[in-house]
Image (cartoon, rainbow, N blue to C red):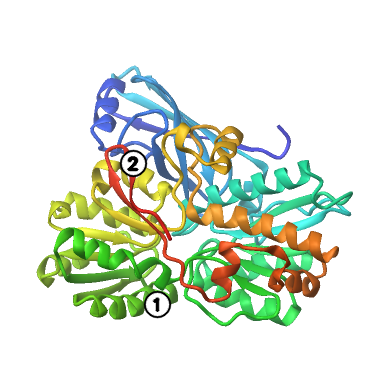
Amino acid sequence: MAGELSFFVHADSAKTPGELWEQLAAGDTTGWPVLRNCRRLVVGEAVMFDIAHPEGSAIQSSGRIVNVVTAQRVDLVQETPWGGRIRIDLNHTSDGGTRITVRVKLGAECLPWFTAASDPGSTTGAPGSHKIGLLAPLSGPAGLLGRAVANAATLAVEELNANSAFGRRPAELIVADDRTDATAALAAFHRLAVTEHCDVIVASISSASMQAIRPGALARGTLLLSAAMSERGKSGANYFQFGETPLDQLAASVPRLMSATNSRNWFILGSDYIWPRSIGMVAHEVIERNHGSIAGEHYQPLGTTRFDEVIESISKSGADLILSSLVGIDAVLFERAFFDSGLRSKYRTLATNFDDSLLDHTGRAAADGIWSTQDYFMPTLADEMDAVARRYRARFGDLAPRLSSMAKSTYDSIHLYSQAVGIAKSSEPAEVSAALRSARLGGSRLLSRERGEVLTTDLVEVTAAGFRHVESRI
């Protein structure tokens, strides 16, 4: 197909295909290209892997196993940073070993990563369309979170166009990857705002990336809707914050976990940037208010792959509860390492950024007992799904990343934006902003949070069957 990038990678092993298969089935990926973080050879299993860049670096990617032929073949569908297909074949060699052949077929959206283009987003939109820009993490430490966000935005735009929400001017979604990096976020924002002339930008990105783009958005008068959880900052004329705040997440969950476990000593652990540190600041207040104590606190640089020292610090701290605001791949690798250390059963963890995608990559066994608090968790059983979750599953299939809180907030933000455009009868940022701040939109959880209300989030626990609701938001 035009615009695709295809290539082969070969590796040789002295082991037979059967031996390699047994090794991988046992969780040992030594000698296997691509499957560096695969723990089970099961259809639907989430995996992380690297795609080689021509300059010699590796591009962190994620996807799912979609086909398994024992001791012969594994097929993957790639989800981030772009869509693609990967096939791994095992073939006997004449000396009794194995030739491993990896066939990679990547979609057109990957091409800017391998050329001089600065941003791996979609191409310039069609003339005359109503352009909705989406800025999301499709790569970097938070890259595991981005595909569900992009899917939810796609669903929202498709639904709005099917209902002619924008009249004769259909909406077009233009996606840009912030790469979980402030500099990349600024370049991606510039493309959406200046090159693509997007009517609105919905951002589901880290606070570090938001800090980078916010001054430019305010200076330009760009309508910017922040859908991700974040510390509460000062809103601007055309800037709205819809995501969960630290107080939303901790006000009810901290005392609930303390009561359920009869424990009071906390170790605070987070990624080292503004949002996790804001979680830590609020946690100090909430924990002390509920007669708990802080036994230790540590913030880890984004992109960390080893957690030996912090795990040792936790074990020596005297804590029995952990509050984690680690992000994306960092959270997955920490939770796996913590489980492997044998300490999981001795502690209860409350996580503020642990959704279905991170659970899939961590594995239910390794994450068993973690509590997570966010606005939304997609039900596991089809007959328990809400209408949006059912439409999401019908549109993207059973193996797609589940609808997360960040994704649902993005979906709701786009629908809310369309309602404001309808009220304003204009796409001019100032007029749409006025409509969003008027009373004409009626009740909305997103707008209530934007106005500063504290809205506590759902609380769930990881079990062998997935997330189990402990307490629903109020």
The residue that appears at 28% across and 69% down in the rendered structure is: 269
The residue that appears at 42% across and 58% down in the rendered structure is: 473
The residue that appears at 60% across and 37% down in the rendered structure is: 391
Disc 1 crowd rating (10 Å Cα; few below 14, some 14-19, many 20+) is some
> Which of the numbered marks, if any, corresponds to residue 278?
1
Residue 187's place in the image compared with 395, above or below, is: below
Residue 300's place in the image compared with 53, above or below, is: below
169 or 31, which is in the foreground?
A: 169
418 or 227, which is in the foreground?
A: 418
From the viewer's perspective, is 33 left or right of 129? left
User: What residue type is disc 2 on?
Assistant: Gly
Number of disc labels: 2
Q: Secondary structure at mark 2?
A: strand
> Which of the numbered marks, if any, corresponds to residue 466?
2
Residue 371, horizontal then vertical, whole percent: 29, 55
Residue 460, horizontal then vertical, whole percent: 34, 52
User: What residue type is disc 1 on?
Assistant: Ser
In which quadrant will I find the C terminus?
A: bottom left
Q: Secondary structure at mark 1?
A: helix
Decide which of tag 2 and tag 1 comes sooner along the chain. Answer: 1
How far separated are the C-alphas under marks 2 and 1? Answer: 28 Å
